[in-house]
Image (tube, helix red, strand yellow):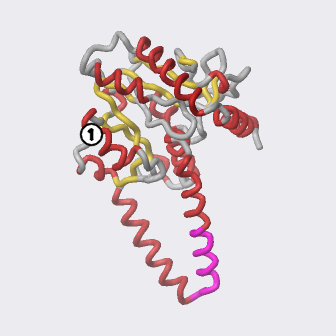
Amino acid sequence: MDEKKQMRAKTLVARDRIPASERTHRSREACHALERHFAALKPGATVAVYASMRSEVDLEAFVEAAFARGWRVCFPCMVQDEERDARASDAEAAEGSLGATQARGAGAASAGATGARAAGAESAEGASSGEVMEAAGARAAGAGATGEAASGHGSPRMEFYLVERERLDHAREAFLSKPLRCLPCAALSQQGYEAVTPAELDGVVVPLVAFDDAGHRLGYGGGNYDRLLARVRPDIAIVGIAFEEQRVPSVPTEPHDRALPRIVIA
């Protein structure tokens, strides 16, 4: 296990150990501090948040404050191009037909592996949205031997969608409460959710696993927020948020890593 994996495992255990009632209280306090960092934004500004799950800092109070201030609030969702899905289905059908004539035993083994993957997905339902999104990004990167995946247009990727206050319950059912689901690109727009480009964002709340005093952030491993932050305007407000238990002496960094300008500590 490399240094980053060890750090992720250790800090996630520490975060999970925070009692639920204490986590709720500290999350509210952190949300108030977060609101102050974004206070300069005018009504109509667009802020990217995340749907907190498991033991992440709960942003519910900040989301309510954002709506009250007239900000546009958007949440992330993993999406994938339908064209790739169709090609993948065709390829699977052809492969399945060939496999049926070649190796029924191997087919049974494959079915067992598929079942194991499904069980793994079920066990991850309790994971945070940030964890799942980064994990999905990592899977996409792992599959990225093809030029299509490398381009970012054929592999699962994180996109943001506006959610109005009165549609929060609908959004939870549509995508916020199912972070493992990778939806076709058109699925949310067909339900009335407007996609937001990085250039449209005026503020971003960044989830993280670990951080240090220099502002370096350790994410969940998929690089989704690294790619997002590389595409936003240079003048926007970017704030990470985490519990004190997630602070480490030093986060291992790569040349492309970007330190966060500020981190709210719950």
Q: Callout 1: 10 Å neighbours few (<14), some, many (20+)?
A: few
Left or right: residue 188 compared with residue 31: left
- The residue sitting at 55% across, 57% down in the picture is 121
Residue 10 picture location, percent across and down: 73, 35
Q: Secondary structure at mark 1?
A: helix
| Residue 85 in the image: above or below residue 162 | below
Give 22 or 226, whichever is nearer the viewer: 22
Give 164 or 4, whichever is nearer the viewer: 164
| Residue 91 in the image: above or below residue 5 | below
View extreme (bottom): residue? 101
Residue 263 picture location, percent across and down: 55, 18
The N terminus - image quarter: top right
| Residue 137 in the image: above or below residue 46 | below
Residue 153 picture location, percent across and down: 40, 48
Which quarter of the figure has residue 76?
A: top left
- The residue sitting at 41% across, 16% down in the picture is 35
- The residue sitting at 60% across, 87% down in the picture is 104
View extreme (front): residue? 21
- The residue sitting at 32% across, 29% down in the picture is 73
Secondary structure mainly formed by the magenta segment: helix
Question: Taking the image as drawn, is residue 148 in sight?
Answer: no
Residue 123 picture location, percent across and down: 59, 55
Tell me where the magenta segment starts and ends, as one range: 102-115
Is residue 176 shown in magenta? no
Left or right: residue 172 compared with residue 216: left
The residue to which callout 1 is attached is 167
Q: How many marks?
A: 1
The C terminus - image quarter: top right
Question: Taking the image as drawn, is residue 237 in sight?
Answer: yes
What kind of residue is marked 1? Arg
